[in-house]
Structures are given as structure tokens and as C-alpha cells.
Image (spheres, coloured by chain):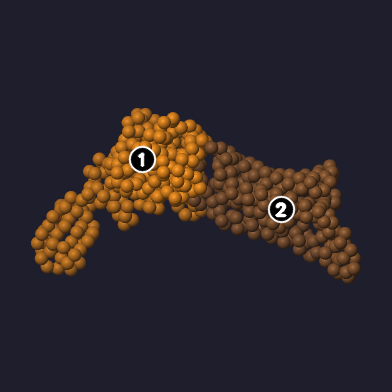
Chain colours: A orange, B brown
Amino acid sequence: MDTPPVISVSNLAKYYGSTRGVENINFTVGPGEIFGFLGPNGAGKTTTIRMLLDLLRPTSGEIYIFGRETYAHSLEIRKRCGYIPGNFSAYGHMTGDEFLRFVASMRKTEPGLQESLVARFQLSKDNLSQKVKHLSHGTLQKLGIVQAFFHQPDLLILDEPTIGLDPLMQEEFYRLLREIQNDGKTIFFSSHNLPEVEKVCRRIAIVREGELVALETLESLKKKKLKRLQFTLSRPVPGLDLPGADFVDQKDLSYVYRVKGDIQTLLQRLSTLPIKDLTFPEPDLEEVFMAYYRKEAQDPK
Amino acid sequence: MSYFYFIWKSHRSFLLFSLIIISLFQFLILKLVTTIDYSAIIINLLEQMPEFVRTMFGEDFISMLTVDGAAAFGFNHPLVLVILSIGAIAIPSRHIAGEAETGTLELVLSFPVKRIRLLLNLYISAVVFLFLIIFCAFCSSILSIGIFHQLNFALFFKMLKIGCNLWLLFVSIMSLTMVLSSFEKEGNKVSIRVAGIVLVFYLLHYLSSWWETIQFTKPFNIFTYYQPEDLMTGQRSFLLNAVVLSSLILLCLLVSLFQFNRRDVPG
């Protein structure tokens, strides 16, 4: 990366007493990049995000945002950040409009941008005049989007931002992300949903059980698609074992295996079996991710 | 929208309720005492009672029947103490521990605002609200005395001291809540704990006045440093109360600022 990274995380660890939150997290995010941060629930995504915003203090490791250390320059960094928390919540006793005014009083907002975002995400006057506690989850999430974007931040940190949005609004949100990326803004996009990350991100990190298990571009990840082997035997074979393949599923005499090793050895072994039918179906990218997600997947590559 | 206005919006119903109830209570209690001279009647009655009955009622009861006594009694009435306690506990517990619980604290701390500044804003807002309630109660008492009795400078000054002392007592309770809130992440838990502590202090304060075994607790009890009857009769120094309570307030404020600044914000 030629230009200095917007986010630089090295050897980051967070422990809650003796319980590990995250450990050995290393990544950088470049300017103008939409960086996907994927992982199942409880993997450590939100813990990492909270440390980026200085809401949690790391046990060890360093975080630099805009070239500045997050703890020492927290205020300066937060001025240039927009954030949508994972479980976005606002003050229930305020109306939507009051809440946005409250946020605006804490930030230097761009005049006119709030109105355009409100219109874009179809927040009606009725929505904004209702108390926040009476808003639907989707409407509340839209309010979360508006408050995160309306000061034109240089860095957006989004934790599961599309939860509760209908598909049309999700598409609108992805469009907005691409637009602000074109303006040179950086986006840190955390999600457990691969298809949405695929839509907007070029580079991703996958976190599992508090550790980073992959950090690469989507293209390179696609090249690592796992091969699957599917065959049906004409008669049962006791103690069936295939070198270089992991068992996935079985139904009667039909078997599904995941190919991970040397294909020659595997083919030699297959030639000794009473095979009636054999295919190598193309797996989708989701399976690659699932392999990373699964605890039992030792080496998904 | 300033933070002060934000706190006002969050608690205005309760604050207005407290302000009206306490002020009205002070006004009426002083009107009642000053309209009829109960003290002469009760003292006459008590003189005809056996010794133990006179002891049971005590001097506090007799003094309550005078204007000075009623003013002091009004500022020490359980109703006033309970309402002010609710205010002093609710504001910090809701806006620190409670917001940590609901997730709004996480959002607010993602804005460019210093943690210390946020806490101080909240602190000052709560201090001002407590002041306003007590100030209105004070004005109401003065008004009542002025209308129904003779107001003199000495009484005015004594009541001013009682008002200030009451304010310091509840700022202490609020500061204690602030300390617990800066450690905890559940608003209700904090409220219950502080309410429990205050109740224990209050009970100990009364028990220790006649139970010798627990009198050693007196110097450690915040209610020892707020005794309006003693202030009215000049038996206790306001300065001592103010110094002790101010020290406690300062200590609690420093601890809560330190802890809030270093704490992890729960999600």
C-alpha cells in the first residue's frame, strides 16, 4: 500500500480477566477502501470495533487511525469518524428529530446533508416526530445511518449496519457506501453476512474465536474455493476412508467429501471403489467462509 | 441541544414534581405551625404526663412546634429526604450505568466528546437540579414565614445554612451514586445499592441516637453531618458539616472521573 493506512492494527489483544476477547489481530485499511470484517456472532468483531473507537482499552497491541494512536488522540479521531453500533439504540424519550438535533449538537454537521439523508432513507416527518421508543427496528436503524453519515466523516465504522433494513433500503445503503467511497472516504464494514460484504468490499478479514483466520481480497479468496467430491457406491464399503478428503455428508450409498489434499492419491483410492456415479460439484464462496467459520476446519486453504 | 437541556428533558416530570411537592410541603408546614400556636398547648399537656412520656416525645418534638423547629423539621422530613434521594440517585445511575446497559453511552462516547467532560456535564446538571429544588423549597419556606409570621435575619440565615447543608448532603448521595455508576453497567442495580446504603445510613443515624453500642458509627454516617434541628439551635457547626460533606463529594467526584475515564464501555 503506497499511501499510509487509515487504520493500522497490530498485535491487538483484549482479555476480560482470564477470558480472551480477541488476540493477535493484525490488519491495515487503506484510504478509500471498503474493508469487510467478517465473522460469526461472538467471534470478536464488535470487541475489535470498540477498541478502534477507544470504547474498550486493549490489553496489548496498538491501533493507529489516521496515523494517530487511538487512546492518546481519541477525540481527534472520533471527530473524523462515523459509527453505527451493532445494536443501535437511541434515547427512547426523545423524538427522532430531537435525537438528530442532539447528535448534531455534539458534532460539526454538514448543512443540508441531514435532510438529504432523511429523504434518501425515507424517514417521514411522522417518523421523526415519534418518540424513538415507538419506532420500528428498521426505522431506528435508518436513524442510526443518518447520525453516522451526516457530518461527512472520513472514516465510517459500521457494525452490522443493515440489520432491520428491508432489501430496498439495503440496496440504497450499499449505493451510499459506494458513493462515499468514490469521495475518498474509508469504510470499515463489519458483518456476519457474506453476500452483503461481497457486494461492497474488495478486501476482507475473517475473524473466528477472537483470532484473525484470513485477510485477503475477495478475488484471492475465490481462487481458494474448496472442491467437493460427490459419489454413489454400488455396494457398501466398510471403513471407507479417502486420503486427502474430509467427510461432509452421507445418504444411503451417496457420499459427499471436501477435497483438501493431493488429488492423485485420492483418484487412485477412488479407482479401487465400486463407484456407480461420481461428480465434482463447484462449491460457492459461502462454503469457503463456512470452512473458516467452523471450528473443526483446521486448514480451509 | 445542550447536555443540561438533555438532562432536563429526561427528568423534567420528576424534577417539576419534586420541586412543587417539596416547596408546597415547606410552605404548608410553616403555615400550619405559625397559624396556631400548638407548642403552648402541647407543652401544657406534656407537663401533666408522666416522666417517661415526656422523654419519649423529647425536645425535638417540642421544638418542631415553633417556627424555627417547623422549618428545621420540614427540611428533615422523610418525604423531603425520599424525594431528594430519588433525584440524587436516579440522574447519575440512569445516565451512566443505565446508558451503558442500553447502549446509548457507547454511541455518545463515539462522538467527539471527552469522557471527563461528559461526566462533568452530567454532574453539574444534577448538582444544579438539586440546587433548584432545594432553593425553591427554601424560598417557599421564607415566603410562608414572611406571610404568616415575622421573618428576621437570624432565622433567614439559619434556614439558608440548613438549605445549603441539605444540598451538600444530596450532592454527596449523588456523588456516591456517580462512583458506583462508573463501575457498574446496570442502572437499576446501582439505584438499589445506593438506596440501600442511604437507608442503612438513615436507620443507623436514628438508632445511634439512643443505642450506645452503635454510636461509634456516627462519625462515618453522612446523616450526622446534616441535623437541621442542631443547626437551628446552634448546637452544631455548619462549617464542620460543609467541610466533611464537601470532602466526601470531592473524593467521590475524583474517583468517578478516574474510573469513568479508564473503564471499558460495555456493549
Select label 1 or label 2 by which is in front.
Answer: 2
Give the residue drawn at x 29%, y 44%.
Answer: A168
Q: Amino acid at mark 1?
A: Phe
Find residue A121 and name its label. Answer: 1
Q: Amino acid at mark 2?
A: Phe
Find residue B7 and name its label. Answer: none
* Residue A69, percent from left and from top: 48, 35
Crowdedness of circle 1 by 10 Å Cα count: few (<14), some, many (20+)? some
Q: Quadrant of residue B4?
A: top right
Give the residue drawn at x 17%, y 67%.
Answer: A252
Please give the chain letter of the residue carrying mark 2: B
Please give the chain letter of the residue carrying mark 1: A
Is residue A200 shown to the viewer in this render? yes
Element type at marker 1? loop
* Residue B205, percent from left and from top: 75, 59
Element type at marker 2? helix
In the image, residue B114 above or below residue B238? above
Indicate left or right for B66 with B179 as reference.
right
* Mark pair 1, 2: CA separation: 51 Å
Indicate left or right for B108 with A225 as reference.
right
* Residue B91, percent from left and from top: 60, 49
Crowdedness of circle 2 by 10 Å Cα count: few (<14), some, many (20+)? many
Quadrant position of the N terminus of chain A in the picture: top left
- Residue sitting nearer the eye, A222 or B83: B83
* Residue B98, percent from left and from top: 54, 51
- Residue sitting nearer the eye, A186 or A176: A176
- Residue sitting nearer the eye, A115 or A53: A115
Name the residue tied to disc 2: B25
